[in-house]
Image (tube, rainbow, N blue to C red):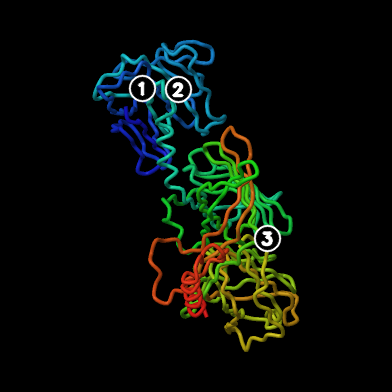
Amino acid sequence: MDPVFADFSARPARLSNAVIGHHRCGIASSHLALGGGGYIKLDFTVDEREDIAEAVVTVTTLGGDAPMDVRLNGKVLSGRALTGEVLNGEVPNDGLLGGEASGDRSAAPAGPGRGAPQETVLTAPGDLLVPGDNILEIHNPQAAQGLLRLRAVTVDPAHDSGRAGRALAARSAGRSVLAFSTERRARGAVAWQPAPRLLFHIDGGERAVPAHLAWRGADGSEAAIGLRTDLSGFQGHWRAADGVPAEYRGTLMERSAYPEGTAGTPLHLFSTEEAQGESWSPSGELRLLLDAGGALPERVSWTDRLGNTASITLSSAAPAPETVTTGELRDVTGTVTDVRASEEFHRAGEVAENLLRGGRSKWLAHEETADLEFVLDTPAAVSAYRLTSANDAPERDPQDWELAGSYDGHTWTDLDSRRGERFLGRYRTNEYHFTNTTPYTRYRLTISRNAGGDETQLSRVEFLAGETTTHPTPDAADFTGYRTSAGGEPTGYRGTTVPGPWSDAEPQDGHVEELLAGELGETARTLDDAARLIGKLAAYMKNSG
């Protein structure tokens, strides 16, 4: 029997040896939701030559209290709850289960809590299967009050239980480029704040995506995350370079098959070796991509879905990708999703949000100094900005200030500083230019002095940015570390950088090959060989010069 699985956590659903029919079923982004009286029918095929003594059916659900009625070719697969009571074929999806003929074959839920994926395992005698077409039905009974949320279904012969799950995992692992939108929340804070996108791809040949991932950036920032079973999101923690900690979470934005989704990112390829006693043996290649919107990683650790673990340290952090700003500046003020002020005049409606609007509104702070922070929905390399004075009181105009950019709201980079500035009238706009090619998601304007008043005000703030093109770093540092195969002992693990781009293309015109250093004593065995060798060396030296 070919592997039978239906994975409803993806759109479109991933199917193998299965055709799905459904009734009273809502198709969500991560599962199927069956209302009372709803069901699915999974049509699969059994090879006529295969003799299966027992079949194993695994149903993965998302928490809840709705029972389910599982039938194979019209026969109910009865379940046994935690108390051992048989519930007329209705199986609570949060109990320990087994088919009537299964003996001690049972499985506990995969995780506690409502919404956590839970596995229900049932077995059925092989004589319920027929050569050719078979029908597996999963019903939410008519009288059920709750929803039955299905994530996945697999069918295996008992002698090779888990075969369909392995096939599903292998197909899922092919889509191993993962992009998450992220948020962070500082200790003691209530609201979550947007953070840079997290994009990663780690493939050491095991064809399994990480379950846990941790890294340290070259700037000293650190993070560790645990991914949900279905990879729809993660929960973790993050610490800025200055030591300030925060909660960290993410939601899956996109999942791609390599090399999709990796363009313009610092992807590194290593040829690896594994320690065998006192010697080293080749152990394949490692592809590593980890982009958290900040500095490149200098240390990465992970555990994959198969239980393999690895931890590596790059011998030196690679330089940041080169970012080039091209074209005319464009107004990116419209991408600002939030603006915060250290103080604002709420009663008069003179709040920070007015700075993003046209017209004659304004922002007013009852202080001589003030901070304004702007959050963009996408990173932009701002290299110019405009400030517009308000309607009255020139003494409230900003005079001295600094502009800084940040990826995360914790670590800031100074971009521009002004002293003794003047506005030549009311609603006058001054434009300021500076050099910056780094895209940031946050910009902070710190007004350290105004023109002599007790209050500070502005009518409008605008940001301008150029189009940026990022050229990924072609090389990365070598690495050293260790890895442990599932159930095995840790061994040494090291890698050598393979310069990119990685393709089988022939060298283009003008390409200069490098000469590999080596012992030449055995290369030239005769005078004729020596003459030819010297000629070749001379040609290489001429080309490389």
User: Along the line of sight, which residue is nearer the eye, 208 or 221?
Assistant: 208
Give the labeled residue for mark 3. Answer: 410
Q: Is residue 508 visible?
A: yes
- Distance from disc 3 to disc 2, alpha carbons, whole Å, reads 47 Å
Residue 404 location, quadrant: bottom right
Give the labeled residue for mark 2. Answer: 121
> Which mark lies nearer to you, 3 or 1?
3
User: Along the line of sight, which residue is nearer the eye, 510 or 343?
Assistant: 510
* Quadrant position of the N terminus in the picture: top left
Identify which amino acid the numbered label 2 is placed on.
Val
Identify which amino acid the numbered label 1 is placed on.
Gln
Q: Check disc 1 and report its element: helix, strand or loop.
A: loop
> Which mark lies nearer to you, 1 or 2?
2
Q: Residues within 10 Å of mark 2 (few under 14, many from 20)?
A: many
Give the labeled residue for mark 1. Answer: 142
Are the residues flagged by discs 3 and 1 in contact, CB closer than 8 Å? no
User: Along the line of sight, which residue is nearer the eye, 200 or 521?
Assistant: 521
Q: Where is residue 368 shown, x and y percent of the image?
A: 75, 74
- Distance from disc 1 to disc 2, alpha carbons, whole Å, reads 23 Å
Q: Of callouts 3 and 1, which one flags the residue occurring earlier in the amino acid sequence?
A: 1
Identify which amino acid the numbered label 3 is placed on.
His
- Distance from disc 3 to disc 1, alpha carbons, whole Å, reads 53 Å
The residue that appears at 51% across and 23% down in the rendered structure is 94
Q: Is residue 349 visible?
A: no
**Placement of 243 over or under 97, stated as above or below:** below
The residue that appears at 55% across and 58% down in the rendered structure is 291
Q: Residues within 10 Å of mark 3 (few under 14, many from 20)?
A: some
Q: Check disc 2 and report its element: helix, strand or loop.
A: strand
Q: Where is residue 516 shown, x and y percent of the image?
A: 53, 66
Q: Where is residue 473 shown, x and y percent of the image?
A: 54, 66
Q: Is residue 74 left or right of residue 301?
A: left
